[in-house]
Amino acid sequence: MTNFTWIDGSIVGMYLLATMIAGIMVRKYVSRVDHFLVAGREMNVFLGIASLAATEFGIVTCMYTAQAGYTRGFSGSIPGILNALAMFFVGWTGFCVKPLRDSGAITIPELFEQRYGKFVRWLAGVVIVLGGLLNMGVFLRVGGQFLVVCCGMNLQYLEIAMTVLLVGVAVYTIMGGMLSVLVTDFLQFIVMSAGMLVVTILVLSYVGWDRMIDAVETNYGEGGFNPFVAPDLGWAFVVSNLFTNIASVLTWQTCIARLLAAKDSKTGRRVYTGTAFFFVCRWIIPGLWGIAALAMIEPAVVETIGLQFGEKDGSLFAMPFFLAQIVPAGMMGVLVAAMLAADMSTDSSYMLTWGSVIYNDILAPFRRKPWPEKRGILWNRCIVALIGMFLLFWGLWYKLEGNLWEYLQTTGAIYLASMSALLIACCYWKRANNWGAIAAILVGAALPVLALSLNLFVQVPLLDETGAQIVKDGKLMTQGLAKYYVGDNFVNIGTFLATGLAMVVGSLLKPRSSN
């Protein structure tokens, strides 16, 4: 049951057409590679804030933050609060981002070459692209699932929806690069913000604040409000997210792309501080939608929806199913247009930023002399197109296990841990060298990759009615073995700590005379 009608389809179609026209029109201004990759470094504060906010809120963001609200209550918004604090702190102090922007580099690995050498630059580029593409690999499927559930589409059209989403974004990104991304991001930010505000007012008026509070308290108790006492969260969850959010502010390629496209480091820092508040909103607003779904939708219905997609856990689909029931015709078109705006801005930026690393850092050793501007732009366009093809096929066959946010943390940690360690050392530690850099990159990538490829069997304790573990004759009673997805909070914390240690030990082991 859904309220999506031809009127809503017309609204969505008009929005998509306007976005495509705007994105393609700016292609005539792309005459150099730096136009394509960093918009000629002419981005101002307000455009940067709109672009970064739009990029960092996609359908996948809406889905995993709503899932956090549905499965964790208000405690699920902690990552957003930590992200906002990290963004404001880095922008306010200029920690790492000022020397990075002042260096004139197009990507982070380009800066690393100045300190650690060409091989580290190349290796850093490989790891960044590996982590970034694995991270983005689930975006298309999750975006398609949202549209299928929210619009009441037949499940067989999921792959078609994914393909259409990708092709539309790829066209204007390939044509106009960062210039197209910035222009369309600005339009998408306006549509997205308006749609989120309207839907949030509708949700709160339909469900009521008291009912949402009661739903969280009934299902999760104090843990729904305090992450430190939640049995599946605790201090490890908070610390893991603290590490991840600081590292993502410093090295996440889509954030850094805005910094490096800014007119100067002062402008880039103001973009960071100005966007910080939005990073709270992007967690709290969809989280409220998820809590509303918790209050209104029966768990059996949510489980049934999940089974339709071949998932044991249907919590990811609770929010779009709930919105499909309450958002009226006409407004449903605004909602879908807002979500498409969010998704298109995210996909275009991600494809461009990973493509810039491939061109600028991974292919750098194969360019014996600088390429002409036209040839460089052609190669960048081909790279973006190839990334789109990879994402399409990965999104079609990869099945996500575990919580979506934890998967994104783990894949992001493949390079977040090592790149943040390399960047901090590059900017502030004179003894840092290529031995430490290589050790940090290898250690930082190894643990998350192992976590993604392995599953851990653990004993599940038997609990009494109070939630306490049952011990009999001095032995812990268990329900037997259960298969757990590895790579969540403890592996994430361990990755950051091990990477930092590898950076320090590797750098100290290298003789000073061989620098």
Image (cartoon, rainbow, N blue to C red):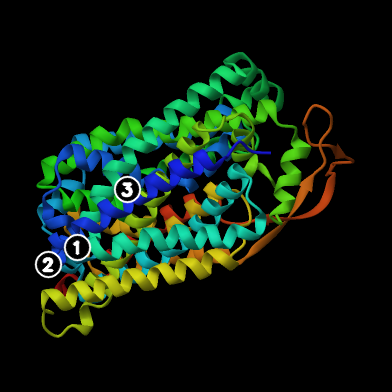
Q: Name the residue: 57% across, 66% down.
A: 396
Name the kind of residue labelled 1 in the image.
Answer: Phe
Quadrant containing the N terminus is: top right
Q: Of the two numbered discs 2 and 3 on the same chain, state the one appearing first in sequence.
A: 3
Q: Identify the disc placed on residue 18.
A: 3
Quickly name the residue at label 2.
32
Q: Do the numbered discs 3 and 1 sit on residues whose CB atoms are within 8 Å?
A: no
Name the kind of residue labelled 2 in the image.
Answer: Arg
Quickly name the residue at label 1.
36
Residue 405 in percent (x, y) is at 52, 47
Q: Do the numbered discs 2 and 1 sit on residues whose CB atoms are within 8 Å?
A: yes
Q: Give SS at disc 3.
A: helix
Give the label, 2 or 3, closer to the camera. Answer: 3
Q: Give SS at disc 2.
A: loop
Q: Distance between the residues labelled 3 and 1?
A: 21 Å
Is 487 above or below relative to 489? below
Q: How crowded is mark 2: few (under 14 residues within 10 Å), some or many (20 or more)?
A: some
Q: Is residue 277 visible?
A: yes
Is 269 above or below relative to 351? above
Q: Do the numbered discs 2 and 3 sit on residues whose CB atoms are within 8 Å?
A: no
Q: Of the two numbered discs 3 and 1 on the same chain, state the one appearing first in sequence.
A: 3
Q: Name the residue: 46% across, 43% down.
A: 10
Q: Name the residue: 55% across, 54% down.
A: 144
Name the kind of residue labelled 3 in the image.
Answer: Ala
